[in-house]
Amino acid sequence: MTPKVLISDKLSPLAEKVFTDRGIEVDTKVGLDKSELAEIIGDYDGLAVRSATKASEKIIARADKLRVIGRAGIGVDNIDIAAATARGIIVMNTPFGNSITTAEHAISLMFALARQIPAANASTQAGKWEKSAFMGVEVTSKTLGIIGCGNIGSIVAERALGLKMKVLAFDPFLSPERAVEIGVEKVELDDLLK
């Protein structure tokens, strides 16, 4: 019998393709309220969610065929882990799914600040052309301080090092060996903020 998955939150169109390419039947039903979800959850072997769908104990109790709940994202606070575990349902997440996107966004915000893009945009929208007022600064040879050098922070550090920046990092869980490995100088928070 073909496994059947319910996608109950808005996911990338590629998510459905990941399942269908593996011979899994998919129903995408975004925006179900809890009673609608409870009514149909018994028909599915898998449930793919983000954060809108709440896989509560009551929902899980009605999930007779459910074998797995997959969370597209890090947090699983919208899933009753204890109830799922009690029924033998595997709960998984994608902790690295948005790491690169988030790190690149942080770098883009750094560029926007360094080049004064928000202020220049506001000025231009106001009908002014103050080109010389918004020259900004280069980031090359500047020092970047990162608070938290785990998954996302280490990617930010890697990108910043590629821009020839000096990178300081505060993270109580960052070992000196890992700091050397990723090319950052490990410092205390007070030193980072100086």
Image (cartoon, rainbow, N blue to C red):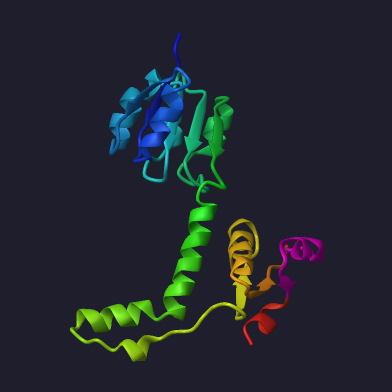
As drawn, is 116 to the left or to the right of 188? left
Whole-percent x, y for residue 63 in the image: 43, 23
Q: Is residue 58 visible?
A: no
Q: Quadrant of residue 148?
A: bottom right
Q: Residue furthest right?
A: 177
Magenta-drawn stretch contains 176? yes
Q: As rendered, which of 7 and 125 lies closer to the eye? A: 125
As drawn, is 185 to the left or to the right of 120? right
Whole-percent x, y for residue 100 in the image: 53, 54
Q: Quadrant of residue 125?
A: bottom left
- The structure residue drawn at horizontal position 35% and vertical position 91%, both measured from the top left corner, is 133
Q: As rendered, which of 62 and 148 lies closer to the eye? A: 148
As drawn, is 39 to the left or to the right of 45? left
Magenta-drawn stretch contains 101? no
Q: As rendered, which of 42 and 175 lies closer to the eye? A: 175
If the image is split into quadrants, where does the N terminus sit?
top left
If the image is split into quadrants, where does the C terminus sit?
bottom right
- The structure residue drawn at horizontal position 43% and vertical position 33%, both measured from the top left corner, is 48
- The structure residue drawn at horizontal position 57% and vertical position 28%, both measured from the top left corner, is 86
Whole-percent x, y for residue 122 in the image: 27, 80
Whole-percent x, y for residue 77 in the image: 49, 47
- The structure residue drawn at horizontal position 59% and vertical position 64%, both measured from the top left corner, is 159
Q: Quadrant of residue 175?
A: bottom right
Image position of 162 with respect to 12: above or below: below
Tag count: 0
Provide the residue span drawn in magenta: 174-186
As drawn, is 148 to the left or to the right of 172? left
